[in-house]
Image (cartoon, rainbow, N blue to C red):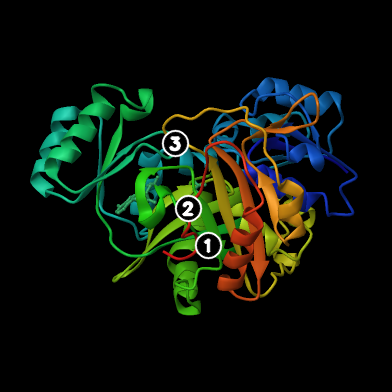
């Protein structure tokens, strides 16, 4: 099969790495890809958000299957457009991808179908929103409605902070139009766990649970990032909690989307908070998480292409998805200054040595120079990923393997998997 993966980060490298192991996949392409993906797939210079360009290229080059990984092309309807062109595509259509693209929509859905989540109200009027905040007091959470690269959420510990964030979103348009509608919600307390699940429209199969580390610095300090590391499975996600999530959250979500005429095929990302009153949804995403995908796919024993096809064909109940025992950890090596401001274009050394120490190094922000050298080209640069019999072993291998890697101003957290 000729397969195209859309995207170009660490998540897409892990997806390509796994697909390249499938005997079914004879030709693998990735658009736009990156310096590491180029080692397992042919990179095609088309932007992930260029729906028309992508569909045209897939048609011209007779792709048998396309996997759309990032949120924005999904929200733009890339899967719909590929289907219309007769090309089987993995990922939700735009009308189902909306569970991530609009927080107001997903909160409404959860309310209507009694799926446990934080209490909330949606506002388009600044004064009404300010009154609600003064009425409810802090801590309180303010969220811009649309996709804001994970940065449109403020957990405010004082009323003043909540008011200021609200003004920045609604008046100053800090997140553009995505801040015209805001969701204000109750602040939940408890450990956070992520569960990604394959979904074929009717059936849902959860992957291993995972946790990521969003803050830039050790001890969960500093600004929010796209993720500084992740591990799986989460020791906090016990079999009892998993049963409860399946009954109270996962299956009701699939049923709710079907009832709304928005069948979901692809990966649903459940961001969960394990509160003292039970598991609650923090957010839905309509795709694989980054960097959670890197450790999760490192633990997958089943052919990923078989799973993708089953999701598209509606036959997920017919395959047995197997996982390795033990655990996996992904340590992100970032550019100094990320996520605020950083420089790129620095040569990276030590990659082969890291892999010789037992890790798989997934590339996030890298590019290959004309001379074949790997250079930094983004904030998150690499995800050094290792498996082990225990989480401690996986963490130790990932950190050991990262030692030979170096590039100018390299920054990483020293506590991935530990907090
Ligand atoms: P989101 O983009 O909705 O996942 O929010 C980003 C982060 O903000 C989450 O991972 C949580 O740590 C935090 N957060 C979001 N909503 C809430 C809430 N209602 N209560 C407490 N923390 C929250
Ligand atoms: N790691 C968080 C996300 O992918 O949204």
Q: Tell me the SS state at disc 3.
A: loop
Q: 114 above or below 370?
A: below
Q: Residues within 10 Å of mark 2 (few under 14, many from 20)?
A: some
Residue located beneath label 3 in the image = 339
Residue 99: horizontal and vertical position, in percent?
47, 44
**How crowded is the residue under tag 3: few (<14 C-alpha within 10 Å), some, or many (20+)?**
some
Q: Nearer the viewer, mark 1 or mark 2?
A: 2
Q: Which element type, helix, strand or loop, lies under badge 1? A: strand
| Cα distance in 3D space between marks 1 and 2 | 18 Å
Q: Which of labels 1 and 3 is toward the front? A: 3
Mark 2 lies on residue: 413
Determine the image quadrant of residue 318. bottom right
Is the residue indicated by label 3 positioned so its CB lies within 8 Å of ligand 2? Answer: no
Q: Secondary structure at mark 2?
A: loop
Q: Of the two numbered discs 1 and 3 on the same chain, state the one appearing first in sequence.
A: 1
The residues tagged by marks 1 and 3 sit, at their Cα atoms, a distance apart of 22 Å
Query: Circle 1 is placed at which residue position?
Result: 210
Q: How many marks?
A: 3
- Residue 417 x %, y %: 49, 64
What residue is at 54 percent from the left and 33 percent from the top? 75
């Amino acid at each position: 099969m000729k397969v195209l993966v859309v995207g170009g980060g660490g998540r897409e490298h892990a997806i390509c790495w796994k697909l390249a192991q499938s005997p079914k996949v004879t030709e693998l392409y990735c658009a736009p890809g990156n310096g590491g993906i180029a080692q397992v797939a042919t990179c095609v210079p088309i932007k992930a958000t260029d729906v028309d360009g992508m569909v045209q290229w897939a048609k011209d080059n007779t792709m048998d299957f396309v996997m759309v990984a990032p949120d924005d092309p999904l929200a733009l309807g890339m899967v719909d457009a590929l289907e219309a062109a007769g090309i089987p595509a993995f990922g939700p259509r735009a009308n189902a991808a909306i569970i991530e693209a609009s927080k107001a929509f997903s909160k409404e859905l959860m309310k209507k179908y009694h799926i446990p989540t934080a209490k909330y109200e949606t506002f388009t009027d600044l004064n009404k929103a300010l009154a609600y905040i003064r009425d409810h007091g802090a801590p309180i959470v303010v969220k811009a409605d649309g996709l804001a690269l994970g940065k449109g959420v403020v957990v405010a510990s004082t009323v003043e902070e909540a008011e200021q964030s609200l003004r920045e979103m609604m008046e100053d348009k800090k997140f553009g139009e995505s801040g015209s509608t805001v969701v204000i919600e109750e602040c939940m307390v408890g450990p956070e766990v992520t569960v990604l699940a394959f979904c074929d429209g009717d059936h849902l199969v959860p992957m291993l649970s995972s946790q990521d580390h969003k803050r830039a610095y050790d001890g969960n300090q500093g600004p929010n990032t796209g993720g500084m590391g992740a591990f799986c499975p989460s020791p906090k996600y016990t079999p009892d909690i998993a049963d409860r999530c399946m009954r109270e959250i996962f299956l009701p979500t699939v049923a709710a989307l079907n009832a709304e005429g928005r069948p979901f095929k692809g990966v649903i990302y459940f961001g969960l908070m394990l509160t003292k009153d039970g598991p609650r949804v923090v957010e839905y995403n309509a795709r694989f998480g980054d960097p959670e995908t890197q450790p999760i796919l490192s633990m997958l024993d089943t052919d990923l292409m078989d799973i993708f096809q089953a999701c598209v064909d509606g036959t997920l109940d017919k395959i047995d998805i197997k996982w390795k025992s033990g655990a996996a950890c992904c340590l992100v090596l970032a550019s100094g200054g990320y996520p605020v401001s950083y420089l790129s274009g620095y040569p990276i050394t030590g990659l082969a040595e890291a892999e010789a120490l037992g890790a798989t190094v997934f590339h996030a922000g890298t590019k290959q120079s004309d001379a074949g050298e790997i250079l930094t080209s983004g904030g998150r640069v690499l995800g050094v990923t290792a498996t082990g019999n225990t989480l401690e072993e996986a963490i130790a291998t990932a950190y050991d393997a990262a030692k030979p890697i170096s590039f100018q101003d390299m920054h990483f957290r020293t506590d991935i998997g530990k907090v």
